[in-house]
C-alpha cells in the first residue's frame, strides 16, 4: 500500500511553494520593468511608438498565458534559444505581466493632474527629469493598491508554469497526487498554501485602496 | 530555422473544433457564472449574517487560489468521491464556479452604485427585497458594470485554455496534440495565439453589440447613466 498524505508531502509542497515565490518575484521584477517601458511608450508623443505599445498590449491581452508559456517553452528552443523551464516561465510571465501592468500604469501616469506636467515644463525640466522627478513619484501613489492586487494575479498565474514542467507548488501537488492518489487532500493542501500567499496581499491591496480613498476625500 | 505552417493548417478541422469547444465553454460559463455571481452579490448584501458570510468565503476562496488548482481539485476530487463526470462537464462547472466569484464582486459594486433613493422608493412602494432587486436595481446595476463584466468574460474565454490540462479538447488541448504529432511547436502556438486573439476581438465586438441592443441609454448617449 502506498503511503498516505503526511509531513513528508507537506514538506515537498512547501519546497514547491518556495519556487512559486521565486518565479512570482522574477515575473514581478521582469514584468514591472517591461510594464514601465510599455507605459512610457504608450504616452510617448511619437505616433509609431505609441501605436506599437498599444498593439503589444492588445495582442498579449488577447492570448491566454498558457499559450504564451507553451510558446516560450517549446518555441524558443525551436528557434535555437535553449531555455530551462524557469527561464521559459519567467520570459512568458514577463511578456504577460508587462502588458497588463503597462496598461494599468499608463492610466496611473495619465491620472497625475495636467497642471503637474505643465508646472514641470515651466521649470524647464527635460522630458526625462519631468517624468522621473515629478510624474512617476505621484503616479506610484495612484498605482500602489492596484499593483499589489495584481501581485495576487501573478502568484496565481505562476501555477500555469506547472504545464511546462516547472516544479512549482501546483506541479508538486500533481506529483504527490500521482504517487499516492489522494487528490482531495493534496489539492486542498495546495489551495490552502496559495490562499495563505495571496489573501494577505488581497487584504493589503484593499486597505491601501481605502486609505487612498480617504486621502482623496480629505484633499 | 525555417517556418513550416502546412502541418498545422492541414489539421484545420481540429483547430476549428477546438475553437468551437472554446466558445462553447466560454458561453456556457459566462451565462451560468452571471447567474451565480448575481445571486452571490445579493447574498453578500443580505442582512442574513450566514448568507453573507458564506458568499464572502466563496468569493475570497476562489479569488485567492489559482484556477488550475480549482479544476484539479474538482476533477480528481469528485472522481474519488465517486462522481465520474466528463472532462467537459467538469470544465464548465469549474469555469462557472470561478467566474461566479469574480462576477459576484463586480455585481456587488453595481448594486452598491445604484442610488439609495431608488432603494428607498422601492421600499415605499411596498416591494419586497427580491422584487426590488428584480424590478428596480438589477437592470441599472448591470448597465453600469457592463464594461467590467465583458472584460471578465473575455478573461474567462482565455482562462478556458487551462481546461486543456484535464484533457478537454478545446483549442489549446488540440494544439498540444498537433504539436506532438507535427513537431512544429512554435508554429502551432503562434497559430492558436492568433486564433485566440481573433476570438477575443470577436467577443469584444459581440459584447459591444449586445450592450447597444439591450441598453437603450448606452445606444443613444454613448454612456451609462
Image: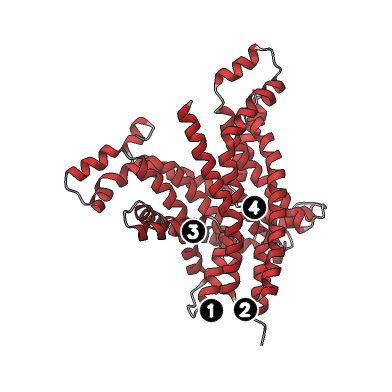
Closest to the camera, between mark 4 and mark 3, is: 3
Task: Pinpoint residue A119: horizontal percent, then vertical percent.
Answer: 61, 15
Q: Count residues near mark 2 (Cα–Cα under 10 Å), then give few for <14, some for 14-19, many for 20+.
A: some
Q: Count residues near mark 4 (Cα–Cα under 10 Å), then give few for <14, some for 14-19, many for 20+.
A: some
Q: Count residues near mark 3 (Cα–Cα under 10 Å), then give few for <14, some for 14-19, many for 20+.
A: many
Quarter where residue A58 is shown: top right
Closest to the camera, between mark 4 and mark 1, is: 1
Q: Is disc 1 placed on a helix, strand or loop? A: helix
User: Which chain is disc 4 placed on?
Assistant: B
Q: Nearer the viewer, residue B159 or A132?
A: A132
Disc number at residue B98? 3
Q: Is disc 4 placed on a helix, strand or loop? A: helix
Circle 4/circle 1 CB separation < 8 Å: no
**Disc 1 marks which residue?**
B80
Residue drawn 61% across and 56% down? A197
Q: Relative to B204, does residue A175 appear above or below in the rendering?
A: below
Q: Nearer the viewer, residue B118 or B145?
A: B118
The residues bearing labels 1 and 2 have C-alpha atoms spaced at a distance of: 9 Å
Amino acid at each position: 500500500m502506498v503511503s498516505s498524505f503526511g509531513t513528508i508531502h507537506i514538506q515537498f509542497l512547501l519546497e514547491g511553494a518556495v519556487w512559486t515565490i521565486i518565479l512570482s518575484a522574477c515575473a514581478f521584477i521582469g514584468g514591472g520593468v517591461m510594464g514601465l517601458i510599455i507605459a512610457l511608450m504608450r504616452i510617448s508623443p511619437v505616433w509609431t511608438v505609441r501605436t506599437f505599445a498599444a498593439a503589444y498590449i492588445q495582442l498579449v491581452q488577447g492570448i491566454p498565458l498558457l499559450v504564451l508559456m507553451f510558446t516560450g517553452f517549446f518555441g524558443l528552443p525551436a528557434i535555437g534559444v535553449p531555455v530551462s523551464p524557469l527561464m521559459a516561465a519567467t520570459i512568458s510571465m514577463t511578456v504577460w505581466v508587462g502588458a497588463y501592468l503597462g496598461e494599468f500604469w499608463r492610466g496611473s501616469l495619465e491620472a497625475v493632474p495636467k497642471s503637474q506636467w505643465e508646472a514641470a515644463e515651466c521649470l524647464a525640466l527635460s522630458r526625462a527629469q519631468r517624468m522621473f522627478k515629478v510624474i512617476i513619484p505621484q503616479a506610484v501613489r495612484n498605482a500602489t493598491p492596484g499593483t499589489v492586487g495584481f501581485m495576487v494575479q501573478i502568484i496565481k498565474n505562476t501555477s500555469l508554469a506547472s504545464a511546462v514542467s516547472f516544479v512549482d507548488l501546483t506541479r508538486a501537488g500533481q506529483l504527490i497526487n500521482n504517487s499516492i492518489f489522494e487528490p482531495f487532500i493534496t489539492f486542498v493542501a495546495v489551495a490552502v498554501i496559495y490562499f495563505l500567499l495571496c489573501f494577505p496581499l488581497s487584504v493589503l491591496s484593499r486597505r491601501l485602496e481605502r486609505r487612498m480613498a480617504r486621502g482623496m476625500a480629505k484633499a | 530555422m525555417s517556418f513550416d505552417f502546412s502541418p498545422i493548417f492541414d489539421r484545420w478541422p481540429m483547430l476549428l473544433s477546438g475553437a468551437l469547444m472554446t466558445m462553447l465553454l466560454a458561453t456556457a460559463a459566462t451565462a451560468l457564472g452571471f447567474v451565480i455571481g448575481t445571486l452571490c452579490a445579493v447574498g453578500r448584501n443580505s442582512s442574513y449574517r450566514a448568507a453573507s458570510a458564506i458568499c464572502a468565503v466563496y468569493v475570497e476562496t476562489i479569488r485567492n487560489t489559482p484556477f488550475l488548482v480549482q479544476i484539479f481539485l474538482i476533477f480528481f476530487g469528485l472522481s474519488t468521491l465517486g462522481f465520474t463526470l466528463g472532462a467537459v462537464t467538469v470544465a464548465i462547472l469549474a469555469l462557472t464556479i470561478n467566474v461566479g466569484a469574480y462576477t459576484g464582486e463586480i455585481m456587488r459594486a453595481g448594486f452598491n452604485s445604484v442610488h439609495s433613493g431608488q432603494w428607498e422608493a422601492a421600499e415605499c412602494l411596498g416591494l419586497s427585497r427580491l422584487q426590488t432587486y428584480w424590478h428596480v436595481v438589477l437592470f441599472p446595476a448591470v448597465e453600469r458594470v457592463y464594461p467590467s463584466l465583458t472584460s471578465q468574460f473575455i478573461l474567462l474565454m482565455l482562462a478556458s485554455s487551462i481546461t486543456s490540462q484535464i484533457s478537454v479538447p478545446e483549442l489549446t488541448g488540440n494544439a498540444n496534440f498537433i504539436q506532438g504529432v507535427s513537431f512544429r511547436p512554435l508554429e502551432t502556438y503562434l497559430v492558436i495565439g492568433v486564433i485566440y486573439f481573433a476570438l477575443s476581438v470577436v467577443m469584444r465586438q459581440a459584447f459591444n453589440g449586445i450592450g447597444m441592443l439591450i441598453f437603450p441609454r448606452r445606444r443613444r448617449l454613448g454612456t451609462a447613466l
